[in-house]
Image (cartoon, helix red, strand yellow):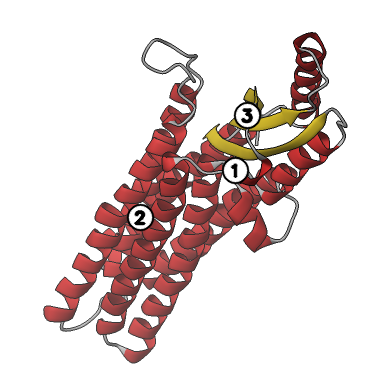
Amino acid sequence: MAASGSKLAIFASIAANLGIAILKFIASFFTGSAAMLSEGIHSVIDTTNGLLLLLGIKRSKKGPDHLHPFGHGKEVYFWSFIVAIFIFSLGGGMAMYEGIKHIIHPKEAPDHTNIMWNYGVLFGAMLFEGGSLWLAWKEFRKVYPKGFKSSLEDSKDAATLAVIIENGAAVIGLFIALIGVTLTYFLDNAIYDAISSVAIGVLLSYVAYFMAKETRHLLIGETVTDADLLMIREILDDYPELEYYGNIRTMHLGPDEVMLGAEVNFKDNLTIAQVEPVIAEIKKRIVDTDEKFKHIYIESNSIEKSTFS
């Protein structure tokens, strides 16, 4: 996804989360709801995470230097990983702490005098979070139009993926808080509000785990999709000058930047003057097909075919 699309989704998420966080804290103050306090903390963390993702996108645009000859594209993966840590330690941890604290020391009588604060904020938050999620998903689908599961697996845009996952978790968390507030009101028992806070903490911890797992692969160096590899092989297959090829290696250096290396074996009757234009044409065709292949290294090798992987 283009950086402009990622930034648009993140800016929308920051604006929504900041406003919602203020409303949630106000509702928690008037009603004493642990679930609403947890949701307020959740929104503050999501706002901070959006700022960190913007920082990652900005730093990832820095060009190559002496220490980073391939640029800083992986900065966005690093900051996405930091976001996952924030969600787990602050979001999940504090929500579970608040819930467990109120389970161990429950309120004798829940305060229902300002219950409409909770309902008003929750329904309003659902509207804003849902709109932010829809915008992020719309931008995401422009690049990954496949099914939901395959799109998530194929995506290398960690920033927009983080926004989608965060906003999706936020909507689910709001429904959990709504259930807790409703049960507390109708059953006149604050234990349900505390339990919903723990449930929100568990949800955020799982989201953090999922995000950390995905960004970990990208930080280490993840290959391109099977469709991209098939495209490369189809281009190489078009050249009768090649006896065989193999050892195709790819790695994402950023959402829109890939390094490709391959070994090829040319037919013995070709001279260097004939080989060089073929290699140049192969590189051009790959880039013309998909411009994210920024660094292409094709090595002419004379080893046996059996050694190619």
Give the image quarter of residue 188.
bottom left
Q: Residue 141: x percent and y percent?
A: 71, 48
Q: Residue 299: x percent and y percent?
A: 63, 24
Q: Which of 229 and 128 is in front in this view?
A: 229
- Name the residue type under label 3: Ser
5 w.r.t. 151: above or below:
above
Residue occupied by mark 2: 42
Residue occupied by mark 3: 4
Dot 1 or dot 3, earlier in sequence: 3
User: Which of labels 2 and 3 is toward the front?
Assistant: 3
Q: Which residue lies furthest to the bottom in this view?
A: 187
Residue occupied by mark 1: 307
Q: Residue 30: x percent and y percent?
A: 28, 62
User: Which of labels 2 and 1 is toward the front?
Assistant: 1
- Answer few, some or many: residues within 10 Å of disc 1's Cα (few below 14, many 20 plus, some between 14 and 19): few
- Answer few, some or many: residues within 10 Å of disc 2's Cα (few below 14, many 20 plus, some between 14 and 19): many
How many labels sit on residues? 3
Q: Is mark 3 on a helix, strand or loop?
A: helix
**Residue at point 52%, 64% (across, down):** 123
Q: What element carries label 2?
A: helix
User: From where the camera sits, is residue 22 visible?
Assistant: no
Q: Nearer the viewer, residue 2 or 63?
A: 63
Q: Which of 210 and 263 is in front in this view?
A: 263
Mark 2 vs mark 3, CA separation in Å: 26 Å
User: Which of labels 1 and 3 is toward the front?
Assistant: 1
292 w.r.t. 107: above or below:
above
Mark 2 vs mark 1, CA separation in Å: 53 Å
Whether residue 183 sits left or right of residue 122 in the image: it is left
Mark 1 vs mark 3, CA separation in Å: 44 Å
Dot 2 or dot 3, earlier in sequence: 3
User: From where the camera sits, is residue 181 visible?
Assistant: yes
